Image (tube, rainbow, N blue to C red):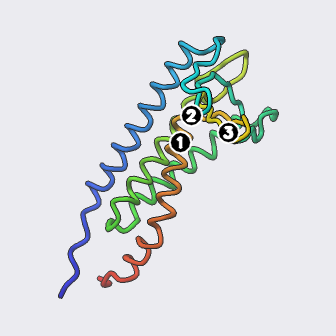
Amino acid sequence: MAAPPEPTRGPRIALAAVIAGLSLGLDLWSKAWVWNNLRDQAAWKVSDKLLHFDFACNPGSAFGFLNDVDWARYFFIVITLAAVGYLVHLARTLPTTSRAAFIAIGLIAGGALGNLHDRLVRVYAGDYCVVDFIVVYLWGGKTWPAFNIADAVLVAGVLLFLLVLPRTEAAADHRPSA
């Protein structure tokens, strides 16, 4: 019995592009809302023990990495452009058997582009920065560092990609050669 034909690449790339666009749109909308409603305002508590929204201007990256370095913005812009270029390469070369891999690519690209947008245009108190605003409470009254929708979809995309990559590679290994 012959293996079913591999799905065509165009619809898979379109899926990744739609997911990236939706992720980017949601991120930019949420940051615009925070910028207009929470900047220089008190935090908006959703739940006293679970979640609140609070404007934060982050000139570095996750966990404050490179917050106090003048060249950090340029470093992250270059890294982001390289990463998005690599994602485009992956979308053009990955086996098309895994729809989830293309969803992951879209999530990662959308998140990366959302934070890139901020690094290019958001200025607060004289600094370019990424707008973070989601604060989740942990045990003992501690909180996870503030993050945004772009961070969340990027991490979800990376986790999904790590889950599906072994199966995607296995499918590629079992394809008949042309």
What type is the residue that disc 2 sits on?
Asn
Please, what secondary structure does the residue beneath circle 1 have? helix
Q: For the residues labelled 2 and 3, say whether their Cβ atoms are less than 8 Å apart.
A: no
Q: Nearer the viewer, residue 177 or 110?
A: 110
Residue at mark 3:
144
Residue at mark 1:
152
What type is the residue that disc 3 sits on?
Trp
Q: Residues within 10 Å of mark 2 (few under 14, many from 20)?
A: many
Real-space Cα separation, disc 1 to disc 3, in angstroms? 13 Å
Q: Is residue 89 left or right of residue 74?
A: left
The x, y position of residue 151, in whole percent, is 56, 40
Q: Is residue 27 left or right of residue 5?
A: right
Farthest residue in the right direction? 68
Q: Quadrant of the C terminus?
A: bottom left
Residue 21 is drawn in which quadrant? top left
For the point 65% across and 33% down, the residue is: 146
What type is the residue that disc 1 sits on?
Ala
Q: Is residue 11 left or right of residue 42?
A: left
Residue 95 is labelled as: none
Please, what secondary structure does the residue beneath circle 2 have? loop
Residue at mark 2:
148
Point out the frontmost of discs 1 and 3.
Answer: 3
The x, y position of residue 167, in whole percent, is 42, 73
Q: For the residues labelled 2 and 1, say whether their Cβ atoms are less than 8 Å apart.
A: yes
For the point 77% across and 39% down, the residue is: 66
Real-space Cα separation, disc 2 to disc 1, in angstroms? 6 Å
Real-space Cα separation, disc 2 to disc 3, in angstroms? 12 Å
Q: From the viewer's perspective, is residue 38 above or below residue 108?
A: above
